[in-house]
Image (spheres, grey):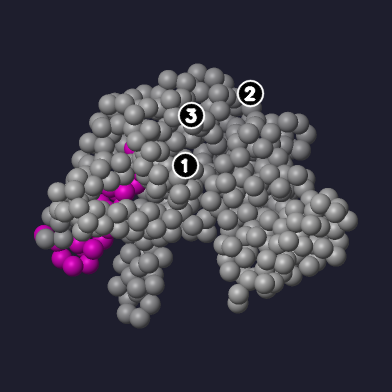
Amino acid sequence: MEDRHRAGASRARRSTPEPFWARTRAIALYPLHGGALFALIALTLCRLLGMLPGIGWIIGIVTTLAIYKYAFEILRHTADGYMDAPERGFDIGDGVVLRLLALMLVLGAVVAAAALLAGPVVGLLTLLAVVLLQPGFLISLAIDGSLRRALNPAVSIGLALRIGWPYLAAFGLLFVIQASALTAARWLQHYLPPLASDLAVGVVTIWGLFAAFHLMGYLVYQYHEVLGYEPAAGDDATHGRHDPDQRVLDEAEQLVRDGHAPEALQLLRGEVRSRAVSLAVHELYQRLLRNGGRADDRRDHTRQYINRLLQEKQERRALALLREALDADPDFVPLLPEQASLLAERAQLAGQFKLSLDGLLAALRAWPKAAEFGAWSLSAALLLAERFGDDAQARALLQDALARCEDEAQRGKLQAALKALTIAPA
């Protein structure tokens, strides 16, 4: 989870976060700044396109998915200690929104089953419990990416107990935000003409969602120590510490503000190629390359940036960068084969199965003679068969890997997987 509106924004407060109840104004205004404001405006306008005849319902579904996907990016971004809004997050390829839909369906089914089997009183108590634990469900799904873990009530209960009474205070503030958005939407819909009311309702609805997810992310950030979560904003991002490359950052940002982005690119290119620079410099250079650099330069720097992020144990940010790179170039691979293995594994653990598969397939094309070729083929084949229902391509990968593999232990695994796919019913 993560581009920044400005490179200097990575200097986030982390050591002693301000309590969320002292930031209610900042939380309420969060959707009205930076990337969140752009997303709010763009997605509100997209909601209007849902009124078009014929294809409107498709646009409406995609827009709703994009709204919730960006809301999850806000939660992750804030949990990592970044108080600015993420600049991207409209892609829905990692499946988090679909897992959210599945989560809501399962929870709804649990409440309905409780009411049917044990009566309305038990059903109401179950509903109250689900509503009270809902922030925990969403936080778990956003941070871990695992639907199974998010559905485990022990996870949400444990999160609430570790945070203590502030969890109830945060729940109350979430209720106020959502109730305010709902009340404002009803009022606007009643008093404004149709088109204006649709726009206004879209604004307040998305505002409420973004503010709520920012609050949940900040709750994780404020209590990251008791929750065992490590924010991506490292100790070099704490308040009062100075980035060793601050002079270069200031100079490059000033050039950008003055309308001299090519000169800023040239400055940062020289720094990145001549010495080891801070992550903030890499981040700003990557942003400038994305906005106006050459594709080759961007691809080469992305490999270098991912390498540095992995060295700093910031795997979540490396995965986000890898997803973006693969979207631009399906054959993109990191610097080293072992990094491809690590990223594929971490993507699977985060529930980003499409990212893991895309990375493995790119690695297979880039390094056909790598020692990891058999393991990559096996992992990719299992993903294709189990997650994407493509047994034919899975068998093709396994057969190709068997033709190349000389390791007997690995051959046994490949043959077992191929046999299972061959005898599986069509």
User: Quick check: 405 left or right of 396?
Assistant: right
Neighbourhood count class around disc 3 (C-alpha, 10 Å): few under 14, some 14–19, many 20 upward: few
Q: Quick one: SS at disc 2?
A: loop
Give percent across and percent down for residue 202: 27, 58
User: Quick check: 238 left or right of 123?
Assistant: right
User: Quick check: 92 left or right of 190?
Assistant: right
Q: CA distance from mark 2 to mark 3?
A: 29 Å
Q: CA distance from mark 1 to mark 3?
A: 12 Å
- Residue under label 2, please give it: 244
Q: Residue 197: within the magenta?
A: yes
302 shown above or below 314: below
Please provide the residue range marked out in magenta: 191-216
Q: Amino acid at mark 3?
A: Gly
Q: Earlier in the sequence, mark 1 or mark 3?
A: 1
- Residue under label 1, please give it: 143
Of 352 and 82, the residue lying toward us: 352
Give percent across and percent down for residue 60: 35, 68
Determine the residue located farthest toward the bottom in the rendered image.
54
Give percent across and percent down for residue 392: 68, 73
Identify the image quadrant of residue 212.
Answer: top left
Q: Earlier in the sequence, mark 2 or mark 1?
A: 1
- Residue under label 3, please give it: 228
Res. 282 mark: none
Tell me the chief SS of the magenta region.
helix
Query: Who's the residue at 22% across and 36% down the image?
Result: 172
Q: Quick one: SS at disc 1?
A: helix
Of 404 and 120, the residue lying toward us: 120
Q: Look at the image and tell me whether residue 339 can be seen.
A: yes
165 shown above or below 184: above
Q: Residue 329: within the magenta?
A: no
Q: Quick one: SS at disc 3?
A: loop
Of 351 and 77, the residue lying toward us: 351
